[in-house]
Image (tube, rainbow, N blue to C red):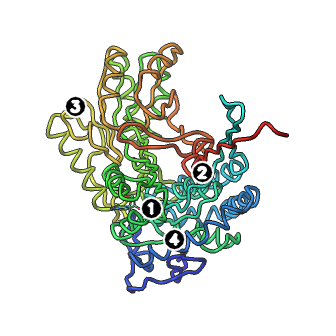
Amino acid sequence: MLVDTVKGMYINGEWVQAESGSMLEVFNPATREKITEIPSGGKKEADEAIRSANAAFESWSELTARERSNYLYKAYHLMLERKEKLASILTEEQGKPLKEARGEIEFAASFLLWYAEEANRVYGEMIPSSKKNKRLWVVPKPIGVVAAITPWNFPAAMITRKVGPALAAGCPVVLKPAEQTPLSAIEIVKIFEEVGLPKGVLNLVVGDPVEIGKEIMDSSDVRLVTFTGSTEVGKLLMEGSAQTVKKLALELGGHAPLLVFEDADLDLAVDQAIASKYRNCGQTCICTNRLYVHSDVKDQFLEKLEAKVRELRIGNGSDETVDIGPLIDDSGLNKVKDQVEDAVSKGAELMTGGKQWDGPGGYFFEPTILANVTDDMKIMSQETFGPVVPIQTFDRDEEAIAAANNTNYGLASFLFTNNLNRAIKVMEKLDYGIIGINDVFPGTAEAPFGGIKESGLGKEGGHEGIKEYLEMKYVSLAVSDKL
Ligand code: ADP
């Protein structure tokens, strides 16, 4: 057992049990076996966590930026020291292959480092006044208590991408991780405890999402909710925020198109399409959800793609040789099965995969390619979150752009071409917050990640990321002529 089961929720610098006594069971999706159970909180714990964060706000925000950044630097180093342990826990509760889990821990740590640095660069502004006797300036201030609601697909990185900038900006945090993956959250909070973060600055509440979510949304002390998850829940949070006029930063679903033009490096496009589609078993919000290939290179592309997809090794992520782990749970598996059945019943050609795989007993689905897909199939509009790639062809650039933009989502899109002019023209016309040109891994701590349309509001990462956690106070000072 890698996990210390005694740890429960972390409120006001103490590890606490749930008052109700209820417990949350955590399962390994590769085997469906129970890993452990942890205290499962609700309204009461959420309320205490918010109070504790609120009480810590003043003193935390009054530290110097350098003092706050020092905690983040220490947490960054400790996270890297613990990489192997954190990666094993992550794989056990989430399922992704260990090599990906190690990559996620490095990615998670990179946000602590980046925001340790950014803490020291929160600048204000002096405005040249139109009146002789006025002096105007803008002072950035931390927004207040932040609630961070995080998903299970990146159980570590989605936490640090929110907690890092919040703490850097001077905001205390109430963290509510996904119920499927609370163990990584516990380990991350332990790191902050060990680096001596003052009590109340980071609080962890695990449990009933609806009850905890309501307490967060109803509280006037919580000034920002930063959320990564489904568009459905994002919309609920938008409704919930109206009563207290809270700020929201939302990182929601996606339906990324990947375009392969006839002049693309096909070997690169195949390798990157596989990396984009099958990483994390297809469970990332920027995963390729639809692939459009130019009809001149379709046969060549599909032949290469199929050969490589057939070589992917599926299995328990703790096995170092595995490329694809399980889906997170039954509902994830059923959604993928349903989309594949729907596509095949409407005439899609199953090139490889297409079935559940029992393996060690988990929620596995074979890496799947669907050709001759049409727009009426569910997979072309619903987010898949699984290892299935549907493929269509196109002949003209305008056709590919129109197809790519034909969605309410607007998170990430990808294009493969060796024609610089085409790359620029197509990029300019794609309605997406993130565009990868010959690159399916755009996510990095120093760049602003975020979607448009129903994929969300706000940015995470980059110098933009910390702005979500700040409010701009405008100050106008009247001066007299006298010296
Ligand atoms: P998914 O469908 O991928 O599991 P969700 O949007 O349901 O994504 O979950 C993302 C996060 O949102 C998780 O931490 C989950 O517990 C939380 N969540 C789910 N429903 C609510 C809700 N009604 N209010 C607040 N948080 C919620």
Image quadrant of ligand 1 equals bottom left
Apparent side of residue 412 relative to residue 329 in the rendered image (left or right):
right
Q: Nearer the viewer, residue 345 or 14?
A: 14
Q: Which mark is residue 107?
A: 2
Q: Position of residue 321 (x, y in %)?
A: 51, 54
Q: Nearer the viewer, residue 94 or 269?
A: 94
* Chain-order first, disc 4 or disc 1: 1
Cα–Cα gap, marks 2 and 1: 16 Å
Q: Position of residue 129 (x, y in %)?
A: 67, 31
Q: Mark 1: which amino acid?
A: Gln
| Quadrant of the snapshot with the C terminus | top right
User: Given this view, does label 4 or label 2 mark the residue nearer the observer?
Assistant: 4
Q: Is residue 235 above or below residue 476?
A: below
Mark 4 near mark 1, Cβ–Cβ under 8 Å? no
Q: Circle 2 sits in a helix, a strand or a loop, which is it?
A: helix
Give the class, few, some or many, for how many residues have Cα within 10 Å of label 3's Cα (few <14, many ≥20).
few
Cα–Cα gap, marks 4 and 2: 21 Å
Quadrant housing residue 88:
bottom right
Query: Residue at coordinates 45% horizontally, 77% vertically from top-left?
Result: 45
User: Given this view, does label 2 or label 1 mark the residue nearer the observer?
Assistant: 2
Mark 4 near mark 3, Cβ–Cβ under 8 Å? no
Cα–Cα gap, marks 3 and 1: 32 Å
Q: Mark 4: which amino acid?
A: Leu
Write down the residue under mark 4: 204
Mark 2 and ligand 1: say if the CB distance to the nearest ligand atom is below 8 Å. Answer: no
Outermost residue toward the left in this view: 345
Apparent side of residue 153 relative to residue 357 in the rendered image (left or right):
right
Write down the residue under mark 3: 375
